[in-house]
Image (spheres, helix red, strand yellow):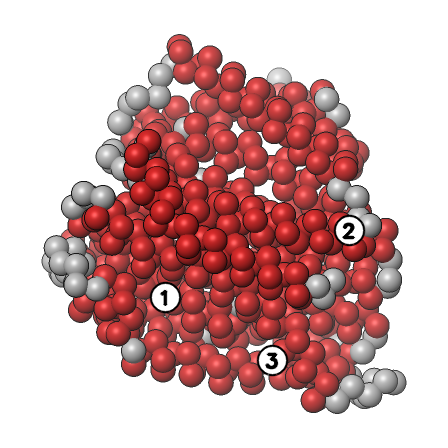
Amino acid sequence: MHKQKLTKNTFMQGAFIATFGIIISKILGMIYVIPFYSIIGEQGGALYGYAYNIYSIFLSISTAGIPLAISSIVSEYNTLGYYNAKERTFRIAKRYLNIVGILSFLVIFIFAKDIAHMIIGDISGGNSIEDITFVIRIISFSILIVPTLSVYRGYLQGHKYITPTSISQVIEQVIRVSIIIIGSFVAVKVLHMEIRYAVSCALVGATVGSLFSYLYLVYIRRKHREQINTDVEEDKIKISNKAIIKKVLFYAFPFIFCDLCKSLYNSVDTFFVVKTLVKLDFDVKSAETVMGIISTWGNKLNMIVVAIGTGFAVSLIPNLSSSLAKKDKQDFENKINLNFQALGYLVLPMAAGLSFLSLPVWNAFYGASNYGPIVFRFSIMVAIVTVFLSSVQIISLTLKEYKVLFVGVLLGLIFNAVFDIPLMYLCDKFTYGFYGATLSTILGHILTITIILTYISKKYGYSFKNTYKRIGQAIFFTMVMIGVMSLVKLVIPLDTTNRIESLLLVLLYAIIGGGTYLFLTYKAGLIKAIFGNNIINRFRRKRKEWYNGILRINGRRI
């Protein structure tokens, strides 16, 4: 029987496939928060955030650099025809991560209570030390599976097979969401257990979802062994295991460093926000509510925007590595400019629109909240700088410009840690104190982006002139979009608290705002300048096919 082959993806194809898969996963992740929020509430969200942020730190240490490093190395070896070395890289990475995953699990599980003390100290009136210890230990089991899963994803992405990894993410999220909704409902509504058990169901869901995703990728690799060249003899150029290990560690460490710093950004808020807000006359429950919004509930909505950047990053890594292996400097420059332009075109209007619609968006997902829309209105802006920072880091890593990357990321993190509390006090004098934590994160990211891009531009002579111009156009048309939505607001206000009405308002404004943005950018030629004629022609063909289909249906009816 004929076996269907895996299809390799070009840069833009891979970017859109990965983005689509990630967006589907994030939409599923957003849908579940509606019932989950109603079950565990804002304080339960803070408890979930405590566990997940600590887990993210250890996950960064054990896995962060591996999928991206494996993707880069596999792409390089595959391009050069070193198939045996490519397969040994995969096996070595699996062994390494199994060991690191077990060690990380043991550290989290054993020292969970000490970590809980570090998070809330002697503060009482909210989540207890015992509750936080319990959920941290529950999430620790995920780290036994996720590292190996990350190797498989990086391996297939390195071959430019983006579709299977995207499907695996959807599988992971479907199973995770199912367990979260069913498990938390049964725990609280049926068995009347404490909130920490509902939160634990969400964390167990992450472990089980990862397991099924891992099994799917194992199946895909075994099914397509011949196509992927898993069984090969020695390469013409001998590459030792020692050289491969050095290369994996050499590639992985910068990725680990970047992802660890990213997790530490979140942990700065975890350790500082609640304590600082209490000093600014917030009661403990209100402070934990704000923390839950920043770390969990608002962050779920931010993922709508961040998913786009993640999808482009997945496709960017193997494509940049391939260009570098072929020593095609012009192709490399074209791809990074195209990446920035596409990101700017997509994420700027999305983030601005979500900020403008913060009240109905929050009400549609979570219901009425005193702090939710106010916190989210500004925290969504973090998504913009996060998306660009991810791409900047990948570019510098691919170019092996580790020194400027380390300096830039570290200075950004230090800035965030040093100014987190002072900016909260400063913002408290003019607006809301918790805006200071978000502002500190944004400025830290901008500092890192500026340092790295300035260095790369000067050293390699890369020109971002057209990119600045097109992002400037995207900003202008985004402002026009917000202006149009503001005029609509005079006629159709956004002050409803009803969930259904809020959802309808979001859809209405999204159609008006998104339609305005697309129309203006199409007429100005911005879509064509960034994405080329292919996407426009494809849309026209689909529209024609759809129109002809309608005519045929009507013809049959007649």
Can residue 347 be seen here?
A: yes
Q: Are marks 2 and 1 in contact (CB under 8 Å)?
A: no
Residue under pointer 1: 54
Task: Give the quarter of the figure containing the N terminus.
Answer: bottom right
Question: Could you tell me which secondary element the residue under label 2 belongs to?
Answer: helix
Residue under pointer 2: 458
In the picture provided, is 536 more to the left or to the right than 132? right
Residue at x 25% of width, y 47% of height = 277
Task: Give the quarter of the figure containing the C terminus.
Answer: top right
User: Quadrant of the rendered structure where residue 161 is?
Assistant: bottom right
Residue at x 75% of width, y 82% of height = 85
Residue at x 66% of width, y 34% of height = 471
Kind of residue at disc 1: Ile
Mark nearer the viewer, 2 or 3: 2
Mark nearer the viewer, 3 or 1: 1
Question: Could you tell me which secondary element the residue under label 1 belongs to?
Answer: helix
Residue at x 23% of width, y 61% of height = 120
Kind of residue at disc 2: Lys
Q: What is the spatial separation of the Cα atoms under label 2 and label 3, in whole angstroms?
A: 35 Å
> Can you name the residue that lies furthest to the top here?
491
Mark nearer the viewer, 2 or 1: 2
From this view, report whether residue 199 is shown above or below residue 363: below
Can residue 165 be seen here?
A: no
Q: Earlier in the sequence, mark 2 or mark 1?
A: 1
Q: Earlier in the sequence, mark 3 or mark 1?
A: 1
Residue under pointer 3: 93
Kind of residue at disc 3: Ala
